[in-house]
Image: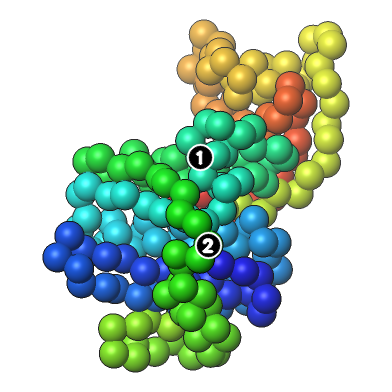
Amino acid sequence: MNNNGARAGIVLVTPKGHHLMSAIHFKFYVTNNDAEYEALINGLKIALEVGVVNLIARSDSKLVVNQVNGGFQARGPRMELYMRCVQHLLRKFGSAKLERVPREENSNVDALEKMGSHMDNVLLGQILLGIQEIPSIPEVSVFQIQEIPQETWMTPIHNYIRAGTLPEDKLQVRRLRYQATKYVEYDGVLYRRGFNQPLL
């Protein structure tokens, strides 16, 4: 996959060798790593929709595969959200694992990417050409709030996000859970974020 023209290709292969192919054109800005994650997320969602139970997912992105599998740390809130989204989807299968495949073995996907520049949703034979309007994860408006060296109004939010700590009062629990949806914690720091859609 590449980010030239913001597009991605997906190929699902059944145990009997049948192929289901999809090409996606992104109508929002994506980095190369974003596009790699978006392709993987879309592929996992398609697999779930068609009833796949046991899955081996393959990507030619060393970064994505290692982040999802725990070999690399996801750096920054955006990469962490992408990683969490993929991990959540993988848990929905009976069994699933993510493997890296060399780019030279991804020729079918590369060909599909070029088709992703089409601007209409259409089913061409067994190849679905689609348009994705918004990212699969929330948009993160990164404003560093602050590290929390002492007790402030943010301390309960930080403790809940980091360790699941809740107050005893049920009303405060409800309020805290609502407030926590507006923040993400990364490397011990709270960031405020703006959502364009639910994470999953």
Give the residue type at disc 2: Arg
Reading the image, the residue beneath label 1 is: 68
Q: Are marks 1 and 2 in contact (CB under 8 Å)?
A: no
Is residue 89 rendered to the left or right of residue 154?
A: left
Question: In the rendered image, which residue does mark 2 sit on?
Answer: 103
Question: Residue 21 at what x, y percent from top left?
Answer: 35, 75
Between 30 and 59, which is closer to the camera in this rendering?
59
| Quadrant where the image shows the N terminus | bottom right
Residues packed near mark 2 inside 10 Å, few (<14), some (14 to 19) or many (20 plus) = few
Disc 2 element: helix
Helix, strand or loop for disc 1: helix
Residue 188 coordinates in the image, percent (x, y): 74, 22
Q: Left or right? Give the position of 144 relative to 180.
A: right
Disc number placed over residue 5 in the picture, else none = none
Give the quadrant of residue 196: bottom right
Residue 90: percent from left, percent from top: 36, 43
Residue 82 appears in the rendering: no
Q: Nearer the viewer, mark 1 or mark 2?
A: 2
Q: Amino acid at mark 1?
A: Val
Q: What's the residue at 53%, 31% (across, down)?
A: 70
